[in-house]
Amino acid sequence: MSPRRSAAAARDTREAIVLRAVETASTDGLEGLSFGRLAQDLEMSKAGVAGPFGTKEALQLAALDEAVAVFTRRVWEPVAHHAPGLERLTAIARAWTSYLGGDCLPGGCFLTAAAAEFDGRPGPVRDSVAKNARRWRKVLAAEARTAVANGELPDDADPEQISFELNALAAGTNQERQLLGDPRAAERGLTAMLRVLTTPANVRPRGL
Amino acid sequence: MSPRRSAAAARDTREAIVLRAVETASTDGLEGLSFGRLAQDLEMSKAGVAGPFGTKEALQLAALDEAVAVFTRRVWEPVAHHAPGLERLTAIARAWTSYLGGDCLPGGCFLTAAAAEFDGRPGPVRDSVAKNARRWRKVLAAEARTAVANGELPDDADPEQISFELNALAAGTNQERQLLGDPRAAERGLTAMLRVLTTPANVRPRGL
DNA sequence: CCTACCGATCGGTAGG
DNA sequence: CCTACCGATCGGTAGG
């Protein structure tokens, strides 16, 4: 009663294509993907690569889903056992910057790159990028809200602002690492994130 | 003794192509530029567009230079008359976030997008993007160093860290505006930047 | 999952 | 700055 061999083989093929697509897109962008080049890399026919997806857009969406799954596995799952609130936020800061400072993908954080690539273009790929970005931002804001409720952050701390700043610092950490090649990128990012969690901006500082 | 008519006309043509290229690349990326499409947009022949540049890479570099010039005009020049140090840094934060929150380009901050697009690829375009990024980062760090020397920031504030954080927050502001469509993006970015300038991270906060 | 093909577009050049 | 062209590659499909 195991799945028919051909169905399992088809799944494996699809998975191999998606993994390679994520790698390629991390350096060349999602728009830089092509069936022909993937076929060469995987030593398959072009039609064999295109078949499981039908369109380039479907391939891009599949690669994006895979990248989200990797991010979840590398950043969210390791911190899920921490207590909600400030403790978990701190754990996220550590896991996230460590992820950005590592070299799991040749071109750096896929999701940051995809956000920049599609932020000016309409369509399903952009919609998916935006949806995932919003989802993660909501996770961060919810943790910040819990931290305020727990008295771990000041009553007037703004959870949305904290979420915004953590996200910005992650994007900056990725740029520091990938474009400028700074090995201290992760450390700089973590220092900044921890300060956001220590002295969060609520109201605009006076006199500036 | 005025320049020959044909030379002046050639300069105008080149300029028109570059301006259109910056616009196109702000949404589609520098790699998304093509002589053929620019020719259609400008109602010229493809060879007429390619001629003044020779290669696509030369066109990309010209578009990048133009975007840097726009950034300088919009962010640096308006603050150059301010006193060096904290006052000028604060003015930069205002001009920068205002620039990012405006809509001078359809696809948002060209330089942030180019950084993300080329951070994983070798070549002259990446080198130019990195060189410009480094140059701006040095300007920011120098201002922070002056602020420390003036006693406007704590003695142990780290100018490089301040430069890193301001840059990260700019990238985050651009993403907030372009991808998530948040009209408060500029305000959030400014709030965060001003806090960096008010309570800069120097050493890692204790106990985290 | 393959071969073979479609029309379109790519970067670039010859020649004027 | 134009027409006309080059070989290569694109996304996608027919048919098996």
Image (cartoon, coloured by chain):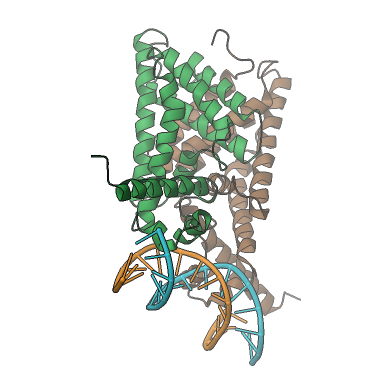
Chain colours: A brown, B green, C orange, D cyan
| Residue under the point 46% across and 54% down | B31
Farthest residue to the left: give it: B1
Q: Position of residue C12 (x, y in %)?
A: 34, 65
Q: Camera-side residue: A52 or B21?
A: B21
Pick the front one: A73 or B134: B134
- Which quadrant does the C terminus of chain A fall into? top right
Left/right placement of residue D7 relative to residue C5 reads left
From this view, report whether residue B40 is shown above or below residue B196: below
The quadrant holding residue D8 is bottom left
For image coordinates 35% across by 14% down, the residue present is: B146
Q: Is residue A87 visible?
A: no
Q: Give how far across and how far down residue A126 sits, in percent.
A: 64, 50
Point out the residue furthest to the front here: B1
The reply to whether residue B14 is in sight is yes
Image quarter where the N terminus of chain A lies is: bottom right
Residue drawn at the location 64% of the way across and 57% of the way down: A61
Residue A150 percent location from the top left of the image? 72, 21
- Residue sitting at x 52%, y 78%: A45
- Asked where in the image residue B107 lies, by quadrant, the reply is top right
The single residue placed furthest to the right in the displayed view is A1
